[in-house]
Amino acid sequence: MSEAVFVKGPEESGRELEARLKRAPIPLRKSGGTVAELWVFKPREVRAIVSFSRSLSIREAAAKSGLPRSTLWRLVKRLEEKGRFRVVLKLRAFHLYEVIAFEDKFEDPFAVAKRTLYRPGSRKVITTGLTPDPSNWDWCGEWVTWNPETAFRLGALTGDGAIRVSQALDAADEGFKEWLELGVGIKQRVPDPVDALLIHNFLLKTPPWRRYSLPPERLGEVGATVESLRAHWVRHVRPTWLYNTFTLYMDLYRVPMWFLVLSGSEASKLGIALAYLTPYAAAMIAPGKVFVILQIPAPGLAAIWTYADSFNVNVEEFYAVKPSLLRVIPCFYKYLAREGRRWVWRIPASSRMKG
């Protein structure tokens, strides 16, 4: 059995990446050879997604993938029919904390999304947020999303377009170790209004190559220009960039969404295996708990239930998610105040109140 082929780094040429994509890095260590394969992408789409996960422009991705820019742009257009590219930042570097509450807190100025959960005899509302003050929320953690480059390197994404769920679970230890090291050493600072506008734009699921695409009236709210956006991106926001993810679109009526609450000594590893190494989940890693939003076709779900027994994990709660979502991105730049030479978060009274 072949060993996994590891990415050399940003200097890898397009030809080297193409050669690596023709090999199938699928080392199986625990699952006894049982592989749940979900065919999602075409080979050239894999090249595009892997390259974009560590690139900030079409030109940079073209150089890494070995594909002409025109071809890559056509692939982007095709992939954007399947899902969306999105920048992943170390948001804690800006003193912004990812939070969740098991109640309707959508009126909180830092609320981001609200969903309704169901199971027999029970109904719950969950609200997620991104706030400088997590004290009045139930849980504070960090959301984990798919890293295509790591998934490819560890064999969970193959060069011919398959997502190998069993291999993602096999690689849980490696994925967990890598995720823990992401963003280590990044300095924390409260953003200024221009930085906050860039963060707001990225959270709107703006891809990295459109990071300066903002309407003039929005720029005017913070007195910014495209030139100042570029300067603030380079000096303040880019140092917090971790990677780019790709979110798949799936019909919620054909592929239901589930919400899991996990605990146990390996809950974080299982959550990261599902969310960091496959495009089918997002997981919040919090102290003592892991919250997983999972949307995966039935063969993959069967593989998870079959194989999860090898992890020391308890599934405390399991809910179906109603196929509707309320979502809004806070205008963070409205909640900043100047104190001398530095900026501080200004927390509205409505956000300090519990409930």
Image (tube, grey):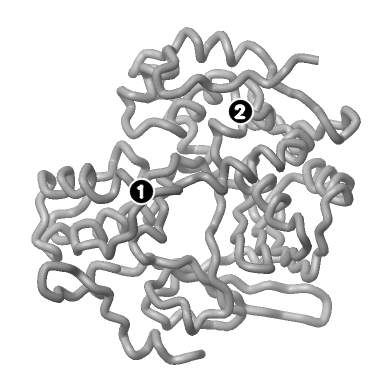
Residue at 71% in and 60% down: 258
For residue 52, side relative to residue 341 (left or right): right
Q: Secondary structure at mark 2?
A: helix
Instruction: Examine the rendered structure and indicate whether residue 91 appears above or below residue 60.
Output: below
Among the two numbered marks 1 and 2 on one chain, the one whose residue lies closer to the N terminus? 2
Residue at 64% in and 40% down: 175
Examine the image and state in which quarter residue 28 appears.
top right
Residue at 10% in and 73% down: 340
Count residues near mark 1 (Cα–Cα under 10 Å), then give few for <14, some for 14-19, many for 20+. Answer: many
| Residue 41 visible at all | yes
Residue 62, horizontal then vertical, whole percent? 37, 19
Q: In this view of the protein, which residue sits in the foreground, 317 or 290?
A: 290
Q: Which residue is mark 2?
A: 152
| Mark in the foreground, 1 or 2 | 1
Q: Which residue is mark 1?
A: 240
Q: In this view of the protein, which residue sits in the foreground, 169 or 266?
A: 266
Which residue type does callout 1 highlight? Thr
